[in-house]
Amino acid sequence: MQSEKLTLVSHYLCPYVQRASIVLSEKGVAFERHYIDLAAKPDWFLRISPLGKVPLLAVPQAGLDDAILFESAVICEYLEETQSGTPLHPADPLTRGRHRGWMEFGSSVLADIWVYETTKDADQFEAKRRALAEKFATLEQELGDGPYFAGEDFSMVDAAFAPVFRYFELFETLFESGMFDRLPRLNAWRKALAVRPSVIDAATEDYHERLMLFLRRHDACLLARGKLAA
Ligand SMILES: N[C@@H](CCC(=O)N[C@@H](CS)C(=O)NCC(=O)O)C(=O)O
């Protein structure tokens, strides 16, 4: 693969891709997106993706094949180190370390969401609903006056959580989970992230239709609970 610009190898629904896209946009970097079908991974993709996962960032190298970065956190850190624009990590090493920890916390929330949105097992669904509610309550304790995770400035932690909250824009219309009850700071944070241009641009306009199709294909409990509640 020889690209002219940074290229983000993507999937329409992948939250980790959205993280990288948000950071690229926040840094004002011109980049291309290349969407692939994860249900039928192309050979060229399997050759360059060690884990067979998106996102990948293809970094042009004069006269050579692109250098490939994999893992969203690594891609975000690389962009932070190489691109000008407002830093998205705090300057203080201790605070930066704490932010990295919260990004990992965001990844654990995404792992819970994967089960929550795909399971057909009602007990597992309820266990994940509780796990997510507990994690959101933990986050509520960590938040200040906002509008973002660390106050006035948008940070990597915001980029990590915006794709988390995007899921619930649809999920909560299907099934009122109660997860966001009595969490005023978290709800204000969700709202602030949802209108940020970099966050809006990280997914296509038909994201919710695609997500709905995904839920139907999995015959997910979330959808059945929604139907029962309707
Ligand atoms: N830890 C990885 C997770 C990436 C990931 O799980 N990507 C999913 C799509 S959201 C994927 O490519 N799955 C394909 C597969 O596992 O076969 C990251 O942060 O980049």
Image: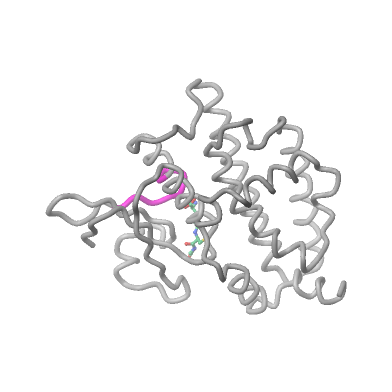
Q: Residue at x 71, y 33 (%)?
A: 143
| Position of 195 relative to 11 (above/below) | above
Where is residue 230, by image quadrant? bottom right
Is residue 97 toward the left or the right of residue 183 in the image? Answer: left
Q: Residue at x 81, y 68 (%)?
A: 122
Q: Where is residue 115? Give x, y as percent.
A: 67, 62
Where is residue 50, by image quadrant? bottom left
Task: Tell me the quarter of the image containing the N terminus.
Answer: bottom left
Q: Residue furthest left?
A: 63
Is residue 57 toward the left or the right of residue 101 in the image? Answer: left
Foreground pick, 130 / 27: 27
Q: Where is residue 47? Give x, y as percent.
A: 30, 64
Q: Where is residue 23? Give x, y as percent.
A: 46, 45
| Position of 13 relative to 131 (above/below) | below
Q: Is residue 71 magenta?
A: yes
Is residue 107 toward the left or the right of residue 44 in the image? Answer: right
The colour scheme of the drawn protein is one colour
- The region drawn magenta spans 68-75
| Position of 183 relative to 8 (above/below) | above
Q: Residue at x 75, y 56 (%)?
A: 128
